[in-house]
Image (spheres, helix red, strand yellow):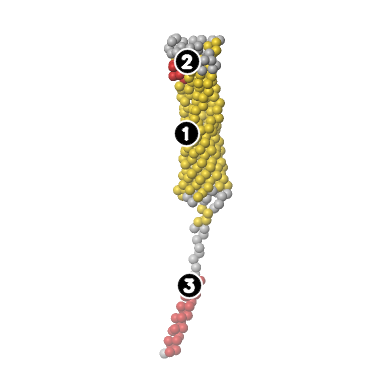
Amino acid sequence: MKKLLLAVASIVLGTASVQAADLAAQYTKAPVMAPAYNWTGFYIGGNVGGQWGNSDLNTSTVFSPTGYFAASSVPAINTVGAQGVNSSSVTGGFTAGYNWQVNHAVLGLEGDINYFGFKGSATGSALYPCCAPTGFNVSSSVSADWLATIRGRIGFLVAPTWLLYATGGAAISEVKGNFNFTDTFAAATESGTIRDTRLGWTAGVGSEYAVGGGWSLKAEYLYVDLGRASVTSTNLVGGVTKYPSNVYTHSVDLKSNIVRVGVNYKFGGPVVARY
């Protein structure tokens, strides 16, 4: 009986030892770390879109007892000289910048230069209140061929590869304006020209999505205000007589909305591991 009990115990202990050995040999493999996108780094890119905006163009003069105009003519000229134009065009250009990612926030500095294509013209005429049927004509035009911006960006990561951001900073463009006055009373003429590299401001919002390999796609809206530029002239001539006391003031301002899409490529930058 004792021999039987010893044999059974040996079999049980042997089976338990084998199972324990099998359990000791089993293990779970650690999960593989996958790289997470990080926005920190220098990038370059291109964009294309459209702009639509408006400009107030103004021509005005003053009355002078020794001047060319009757007192009633000056208000009429100033009314016709208050003109406005709308403009729309395709835009496109190049972008460069640098981002710093801090947890779920992304801070950046970005600059771009683009074809702007802002242009427009207006013409108005009226009869002299004192001297109908003779009258006058005022014409004006504005253009800005290029636009550059230098902006800060501050954004929040909705997902590791999806950034929503606000942006704002300086806007720079050469604004050109041309103004002309003529009449049928004594073939009077006057003209003025503005060529001014304007420093204005811009602000907007955008979204950028990283698609891998350093590439990202973005969509952006910007509002641009280049302020007002003005010039005066004393070159009114009526017939063969000059009338410098009738000082003319010409001014132009420019505001625009820009919507564009673009693609950026980021060079290097750290990659953060995640499970």
Residue beneath label 2, please?
Answer: 63
Residue beneath label 1, please?
Answer: 257
Q: Quadrant of residue 173?
A: top right
Residue beneath label 3, please?
Answer: 23
Height in image: 30 above or below 200?
Answer: below
What residue is shown at x 46% (from left), y 49% (from top)?
159
Q: Callout 2, which amino acid?
A: Phe
What residue is shown at x 52% (from left), y 56% (from top)?
273
Height in image: 60 above or below 7?
Answer: above
Alpha-carbon span between mark 3 and mark 1: 69 Å
| In front: label 3 or label 2 | 2
Disc on the earlier residue, 2 or 1: 2
Nearer to us in this view, 7 or 177:
177
Nearer to us in this view, 7 or 260:
260
* Residue 97 at x, y percent in the picture: 55, 42
**Residue count near mark 1 (Cα–Cα under 10 Å), binned few <14, some 14–19, many ≥20:** some
